[in-house]
Image (cartoon, rainbow, N blue to C red):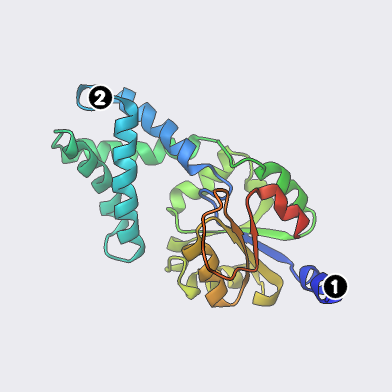
């Protein structure tokens, strides 16, 4: 049993990470970017405070992003529609303003550099032992700048988005495309991510081992390969 455990771990050569909420602190960076937009466009004339604007956007973005992943909404529409709906809820009916803010959001957002605690320590440790890659459902024009601005792009050999592959996680083809680009096999690869359905169960159905990053200890019944609450715990596994 101990030997099997040892050999299994030594079989890994490639580690595939999700980016947003796994390494890059999406929630903090989103709030910082939206706070700038709130001030730039004097949205205090409509919204009582920045938090109201941010929470309203977050709710609408989550709803529309789910539709985008299901193929029910195009990227072009998503870019502005999430702001158009948010502004309309507080009396601002302006598609041009929503489009302007939508573009501004995608410019400001990747400049933010907050990382999930333990990111650098974990990547420093893993980079000396494995080949590291990213599989993301995020827009291709913002994911690489996020890595570069946060100074963690140096750790990764391949950064593959759904726009590169043509498929969103949890589609098996998204994982298959990423592995083919990295010249990796399933048995020597492991997926690390924070989304149980999209990252972890998607990878499991594809045939990859997984590490579920579950910082809030969300209850679930899924059988995952490994589970951690903090990124640095990965050092005990790999």
- Quadrant of image for the N terminus: bottom right
* Identity of the residue drawn at 21% across and 42% down: 84
Q: Are marks 1 and 2 in contact (CB under 8 Å)?
A: no
User: x, y (%) of residue 151?
Assistant: 63, 40
Residue that numbered label 1 is attached to: 2
Hey, which quadrant is residue 69 in on the image?
bottom left
Q: Nearer the viewer, mark 1 or mark 2?
A: 1
The disc at residue 48 is: 2
* Identity of the residue drawn at 67% across and 62% down: 15
Towards the viewer: 205 or 128: 205
Mark 2 or mark 1, which is nearer the start of the sequence?
1
- 66 vs 202, left or right, is left
- Quadrant of image for the C terminus: bottom right
User: x, y (%) of residue 8?
Assistant: 77, 73
User: x, y (%) of residue 224?
Assistant: 60, 68
Towards the viewer: 163 or 185: 185
Report how many numbered discs are placed on residues in the image: 2
User: x, y (%) of residue 16?
Assistant: 62, 61
- 237 vs 169, left or right, is right
Q: Residues within 10 Å of mark 1 (few under 14, many from 20)?
A: few
Q: Secondary structure at mark 2?
A: loop
* Identity of the residue drawn at 17% across and 41% down: 95
Q: Secondary structure at mark 1?
A: helix
Q: Residues within 10 Å of mark 2 (few under 14, many from 20)?
A: few
- 81 vs 139, left or right, is left
Towards the viewer: 147 or 213: 213
Give the Cα distance between marks 1 and 2. Answer: 59 Å
């Amino acid at each position: 049993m101990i030997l099997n455990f040892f050999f299994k771990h030594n079989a890994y050569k490639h580690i595939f990470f999700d980016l947003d909420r796994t390494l890059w602190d999406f929630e903090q960076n989103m709030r910082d970017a939206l706070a700038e937009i709130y001030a730039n466009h004097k949205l205090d004339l409509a919204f009582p405070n920045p938090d109201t604007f941010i929470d309203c956007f977050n709710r609408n973005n989550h709803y529309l992003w789910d539709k985008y992943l299901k193929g029910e909404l195009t990227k072009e529409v998503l870019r502005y529609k999430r702001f158009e709906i948010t502004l309309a809820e507080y009396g601002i009916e302006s598609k041009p303003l929503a489009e302007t803010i939508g573009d501004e959001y995608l410019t400001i957002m990747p400049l933010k550099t907050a990382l999930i605690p333990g990111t650098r320590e974990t990547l420093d440790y893993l980079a000396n032992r494995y080949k590291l890659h990213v599989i993301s459902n995020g827009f291709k024009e913002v994911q690489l700048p996020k890595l570069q601005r946060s100074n963690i792009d140096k750790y990764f050999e391949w950064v593959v988005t759904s726009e590169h592959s043509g498929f969103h996680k949890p589609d098996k083809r998204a994982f298959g495309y990423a592995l083919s680009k990295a010249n990796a096999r399933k048995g020597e690869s492991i997926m690390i991510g924070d989304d149980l359905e999209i990252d972890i169960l998607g990878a499991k159905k594809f045939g990859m081992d997984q590490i579920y990053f579950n910082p809030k200890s969300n209850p679930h019944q899924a059988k995952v390969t490994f589970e951690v609450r903090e990124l640095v715990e990965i050092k005990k596994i790999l």
